[in-house]
Amino acid sequence: MQPLNYTTEVMFATAGIIGDNKKREKAFYGGYTMTQLLNKAFEKANQLPETEQNALGQWLIEEIIAEKKWQKSFAESENELSRMAEEALEEYEKGDTAPLDSNQL
């Protein structure tokens, strides 16, 4: 399957199907769905000049990558965060904490 247009390529990229022709064909022919709002956004983006489409596409891809990194970081630190929360609750229950004064930050 040949590249279509930048907007469609961005949609494929967000679905993680760069370079996989079978998945690209499935996505293009209805195997994957997107919300009506996202579809409308891509339709609007498709009306922008090419340079603006490229900038929007690059921004969107970077945002998706950043979000996946955050999700991975939080998933990997879940046990540590839970331990820290339990420790904070124990300190509170012992009376080892003080009210936070935002004026002193």
Image: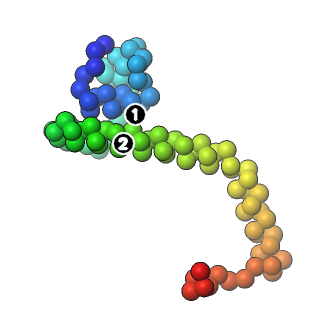
Q: Residue furthest right?
A: 94
Residue 3 visible, this orientation = yes
Q: Are marks 2 and 1 in contact (CB under 8 Å)?
A: yes
Instruction: Tell me residue 68's x, y (percent).
Output: 52, 41
Q: Residue furthest front?
A: 51
Question: How many marks are shown on the rendered structure?
Answer: 2
Which quarter of the figure has residue 33?
Answer: top left
Q: Residue at x 47, y 40 (%)?
A: 65
Please indicate whether residue 21 sits to the left or right of residue 42 in the image: right
Q: Which quarter of the image is occupied by the C terminus?
A: bottom right
Q: For mark 2, what is the residue?
A: 60
Question: What's under tag 1, amino acid-wise?
Answer: Thr
Q: For mark 1, what is the residue?
A: 14
Please indicate whether residue 12 sits to the left or right of residue 100 in the image: left
Front in this rendered view, residue 36 or 6: 6
Q: Residue at x 79, y 65 (%)?
A: 87
Question: What's under tag 2, amino acid-wise?
Answer: Leu
Residue 40 visible, this orientation = no
Front in this rendered view, residue 24 or 103: 103
Q: Residue at x 74, y 61 (%)?
A: 84
Which quarter of the figure has residue 28?
Answer: top left
Instruction: Tell me residue 9's x, y (percent).
Output: 31, 27
Pointer 2 local density, CA inside 10 Å: few below 14, some 14–19, many at least 20: some
